[in-house]
Amino acid sequence: MSSGMRAYVLRRVIMLVPLLLGLSLIMFLLLRLAPGDPATAMMSPQAANNPEIVAQTRKNLGLDEPLYMQYVIWVSNLATGDLGTAYTFNNKPVLSLIGERVVGTLQLQGAAIFLGIMIAAPVGILSATRQYSIWDNSVTVGSFIGLALPSFWLALLLQVWLGVKLGWFPIISTGQASADWAERWKYFVLPIVVLTLPTIAYFARFMRSSMLEVINQDYVTTARAKGLNRKQVLYGHALRNALLPMVTVIGLQLPQIIGGAVIIEQIFAWPGVGLLAFDAISRRDYPVILGITMVAGAAIMVASVIVDVVYTLLDPRVSVAGGSNG
């Protein structure tokens, strides 16, 4: 790695600090301004009507401190890698909770993104090379439908149709941990299908657009004029450059592997970070909500830095100084 690249990476990493601080402040204030009280959320109706019990619970949770002091304490702990302790979830450390759930999300989201890329890339390429054909029009319409379909509606539809009526697949993940892999794969099918379809639609449209832009460039026309056959022009010249913008798109999707899909994981009762976030919101569990937000936000920021570095390494025309070398 060159000295210029090292300086660029260091500069970007340093910039992450104020961004993470800003994210922490915004999320902290939004949670405190939201309606509901964590102290009463974890109580029975009878206890919630007792002011003394509520006051003691708020003191135990540290919610009786001034708002600015709560933020300072939380950020100080955050700087040491301590995301706090959950109010509920058996008072476990937030980092441990996320660590327990992240494997399930990695399996689900990783499979969905991988399948999305493997299917969308060739579909987008064929669509671009056969512009305005029946295939291209079908891909365009299918992509719009895939992007427009509400994921929660599709999930419920597949549960009713393939799970309840036909009985092909289980509709929730309960029992998958105890099942062997000969049966366990069935639990993955429905949520992966729901997550993969919009991913295919998004990547295919982007791949088509990128490929169309490249095949109309002068160097591709020159390659054709030299007598190279269609495959040599397409795969030897156009495809490599068309894939470069996909690095950015794919890179920005990767944080979903950690953040999860809240609604889909809740619908399928999938034991991932998304379901943990949904439960934490329902219980007004501030430390868990903030912890998941900070981990997901940090993942997005780090992914953006990695994508910029990879893009610069793949395309020497891009300068780390912010301009173009060509």
Image (cartoon, rainbow, N blue to C red):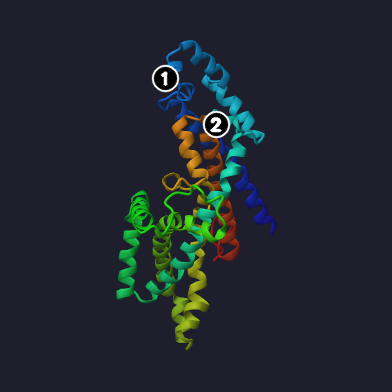
- Amino acid type at circle 2 is Pro
Residue 287: image tag = 2
Q: Is residue 310 above or below residue 138?
A: above
Q: CA distance from mark 1 to mark 2?
A: 23 Å
Nearest the camera: 162 or 258? 162
Give residue 122's quadrant in the image: bottom left
Q: Upstream in the sequence, badge 1 or badge 2?
A: 1
Location of the C terminus by quadrant is bottom right
Question: At numbered mark 2, what does the secondary structure look like: helix, strand or loop?
Answer: helix
Q: Does the image show residue 64? A: no
Question: At numbered mark 1, what does the secondary structure look like: helix, strand or loop?
Answer: helix
Q: Nearer the viewer, mark 1 or mark 2?
A: 1
What count of labels does the image hold? 2
Residue marked by disc 1: 45
- Amino acid type at circle 1 is Pro
Nearest the camera: 292 or 47? 47
